Image (cartoon, grey):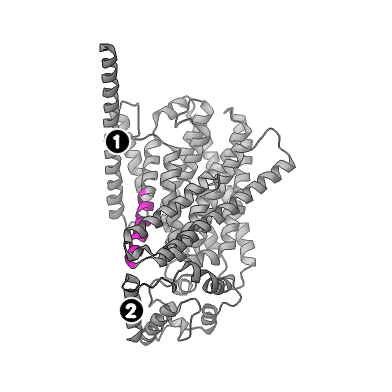
Amino acid sequence: MVFVLGTLLAKMNNLSTSDHSSVVSINLFVALLCACIVIGHLLEENRWMNESITALVIGVCTGVVILLISGGKNSHLLVFSEDLFFIYLLPPIIFNAGFQVKKKQFFRNFTTIMLFGAIGTLISFIIISLGAITFFRNMNLGLAIGDYLAIGAIFAATDSVCTLQVLNQDETPLLYSLVFGEGVVNDATSVVLFNAIQNFDLSHISTSAALQLVGNFLYLFITSTVLGVVVGLLSAYIIKKLYFGRHSTDREVAITMLMAYLSYMLAELCNLSAILTVFFCGIVMSHYTWHNVTESSRVTTKHTFATLSFVAEIFIFLYVGMDALDIEKWRVISDSPKTSVSVSSILLGLILVGRAAFVFPLSFLSNLTRKSPFEKIGFKQQVTIWWAGLMRGAVSMALAYNQFTKSGHTQRYGNAIMITSTISVVLFSTVVFGLMTKPLVRLLLPSSKRLSRMISSEPVTPKSFIVPLLGNEHDPELDMDEQNIVDSQNSEANQGDRNLPRPSSLRMLLRKPTHTVHYYWRKFDDCFMRPVFGGRGFVPFVPGSPTEQTVQQWQEESKR
């Protein structure tokens, strides 16, 4: 009896000690997140730094301190978990990217985005895989053919998180649209490729097997997109019909957030590409669902999604910085530092070549389909796209851990080399390429070109430069309530901005895009989709609701 009691007390003591250490680790990590936000705010105007680099640097410095305190035994507060990354951290980042994206720009460049994100990723994957087979086989790393192909998928994944913080959606809308869209499709393509490689029988490679792999890839791509669209439309229909806002805006916000997360988890459950699913769910929900909720819920959901994405991004880069000094991985390769440096250098070279191999040729093909010179991707823009996509980040780290570690740990020499090389590539590309991207964009594409911004960006405010170009005629892309507001603002804008240029050809392009897919989609959307699922101009009208108050305000403003 005494022995049993002593055993129970010992277990309780160990449990309490473990719980206490976890609480201490979480406290320190939250404090570091706060420090990243404060320092990032202080460096907001810095032309070199961005918050991802700030979080990486703070993570590395924290890792050094922990390493010194622990006597060289440990360097991070939390153990890396793929579930933590893929289930909790990645969904809000990708969903917010789709929720906040400027849809006109994204779908206007959809063909080019798919060229870069899908075909370009496949080209980069092939080049990196062949390069890894060519160079690493002679280094005696003990890697199999599946590892070489996995390396191609791992380093074909660009870091859309880092890129989105470097580029500005308003200053460089065309570039932002292309790099952002490519980043999301690229991540999805890389993850699908990685999963296909792990499930593919590499001992029996044949033409039929390769065709089966391509068919499986297309199936995952299409079904993942359809699932995201279906869940987004379902959320819009439920909120439009039930209109939770008449009783509680909390329920509106809750059902919107939960439906967004449900799309991601359904894709995981069905073994689809959850990244692609939640991205298109975000686009659909911003187009329909967001307009069906009350005004207060719109503000709440928009800032909630942005905040969750922001914190998740900082969390990821902070952890990557701390994990860079994990002593266990570096101890395994301590006898051959030159090999680690060589592998990292080769991987960086393959990334540079692999990206250049598709950005410039595919940009040339894309320009052949663009008739207007304003829509063509210039050489300076191509260089910027090539450079901005050189960064590697959290997706590459997560896939590398999946392939070369077991529960975050590794003792095999070849696996340790690949993990440390991945960490080195992520740190170098994020810090060096990230630091140089802002000056490069400002050098190649000065933001003072007002005409290019007028053509390729949506209006930032109702009185932006594009309003005078629309004149007094009806804009088919606006609904009736919005048109009343725009008409009243046009009269004000025309009085104060009479000196702005008004080229008739540009005006016609903006008013009547009769030969574009976007024009026909808007007609279909207004006739069939919005009456069923709601959206801008089709918000539910309930007497005494915030929607009625908003409509009354619009009508009063239009009469002024």
Q: Is residue 309 magenta?
A: yes
State the extent of the magenta-drawn residues as a range: 295-311
Q: Main secondary structure of the magenta part?
A: helix
Query: For numbered disc 1, what is the local secondary structure?
Result: helix
Q: Is residue 112 magenta?
A: no
Query: On the rendered image, what quadrant is the N terminus found in?
Result: top left
Mark 1 vs 2, N-terminal side: 1
Q: How far from the left and from the top, in percent, is residue 74?
A: 35, 29
Residue 450 sits in which quadrant? bottom left
Mark sitting on residue 552: 2
Query: For numbered disc 2, what is the local secondary structure?
Result: helix
> Image point 42% across, 73% down: which residue?
459
Q: Which amino acid, mark 1? A: Ser
Query: On the rendered image, what quadrant is the C terminus found in?
Result: bottom left
Residue 273 in view of the camera: yes
- Distance (Cα) linking label 1 and label 2: 52 Å
Q: How far from the left and from the top, in percent, is residue 338?
A: 50, 31
Residue tagged by mark 1? 25
> Image point 55% across, 80% down: which residue?
512
